[in-house]
Amino acid sequence: MPGQRSAAGSDFDADDGAEPPFIVTGWPSGRCLVDLLTAGPLDPWQAARVIAEAADGLAVAHEAGLAHLCLTPACLWCGRGGEVTITGLGIVAALTGAHAADLAQADTRGLARLLYAALTGYWPGEGRAALPPAPRPGGRIARPGQVRPGIPAAIDSVTCRALSGQAREGGPPILSPAQLAMELAAVTRPGPSSGPSPGAAPAPTLPDRTAWLPPPSSRAVRRLTGLTAVVVILAVLAGGGWLAVREMTAPHRPSGARPAVAAQTLTPVSATAFGPLGGSDGDNPELARLAIDGSPATAWHTQWYATAAFGSLKPGTGLLLDMGRPVTITSAQIMLGVITGADFQLRAGGEPVLADLQPVARATEAGGLVTMRPARPAKARYLLLWFTRLPPDSSGTFEAIVYNVRLHGIA
């Protein structure tokens, strides 16, 4: 067939004379990220390690002058043996005409989108990519930790810095696949600040099965819609199977000791805007229920003020949660707006009166997902999120936003 070239000794074919040109490649082994996410988001530590391997492989490709530019969840495959495969390198961009002024940053942002999808099950890029679009409260993409409580702050930070290409939370912008691989490797490395990690994986390498179209013996033919036709499948050995279930060692309990009662998720029966005088002068009372509806796309927010100190109009404002009966609170996860700067207290008591609701935990300069743990379990029917200082908003004023409140304890 005129114009057809194939890599010697392989099952790859291409025809750059057809309309449109086409390339035939072997089907990758394993399951693509889209299929994996049908069962829900991945474990955050596993998601970070998989994308770290993909980023390491793309860093090798960039050193060879190759970029992808069209990364989607359908391009990332995870094999049973732990290999991570990226398909479409050098092909999809050539066929679609995709281009970028900064190839490294473009692929870094693509990898960050894959990480966001693996962490949350939502797609933060353009189009659906076979996944629902990421929530955009206030027109901005919600942080992974806002969408899915429990994502470690370090992974959330790396995702945001790679996705935006800007410095955030005191960390530098992440602008290349190599840098992203290093940052993710750092946060998933075993240590007191990271989650469980399996044995060290072998250094990522490009597989032996690498096919170039046209093959090296035919380098004079180098045209596919105006660009070099390249087929590269990056397979990175992750070792031990990245979806293997981790066994957690139970802590030793002395003989005869009574087992501790496991904490559970506790759901408030109602939420009420609450001010210095109680429920009668709270901010935006009609929105209070949105803080406990479980949706990261809806929120309660305070009124806007001219200063972080409420424009000297009041000492504070908050959200009162009625548990319906006395319960024991061991921890609370509060999903705030992305801008830091909020000072607030978690207060607990038996009556919905500010004087009876005593502080049991505090947070300062807070934003994003905040986890609060009382020094000792707090038994109370009412809980109050009491803001004493507001973060800035994008309009030059100040307001606090609460997307979701999740409580843990003993009923």
Image (cartoon, rainbow, N blue to C red):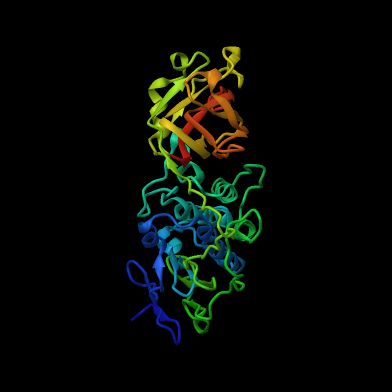
Q: Position of residue 193 (x, y in %)?
A: 64, 53
Above or below: residue 109 compared with residue 409 = below
**Which of the 4 quarters of the picture holds residue 396?**
top right
- Does residue 302 appear anywhere in the picture? yes
**Which of the 4 quarters of the picture holds residue 33?**
bottom left
- In the depicted view, which residue is nearer to us: 393 or 250? 250
- In the depicted view, which residue is nearer to us: 280 or 369? 280
- In the depicted view, which residue is nearer to us: 173 or 120? 120
Taking the spot 55% from the left edge, 61% from the top edge, the residue there is: 250
Q: Residue furthest bottom?
A: 9
Taking the spot 64% from the left edge, 61% from the top edge, the residue there is: 190
Above or below: residue 148 compared with residue 271 = below
Q: Position of residue 307 (x, y in %)?
A: 60, 19
Above or below: residue 127 compared with residue 364 = below
Q: Quadrant of the N terminus?
A: bottom left
Taking the spot 44% from the left edge, 35% from the top edge, the residue there is: 137
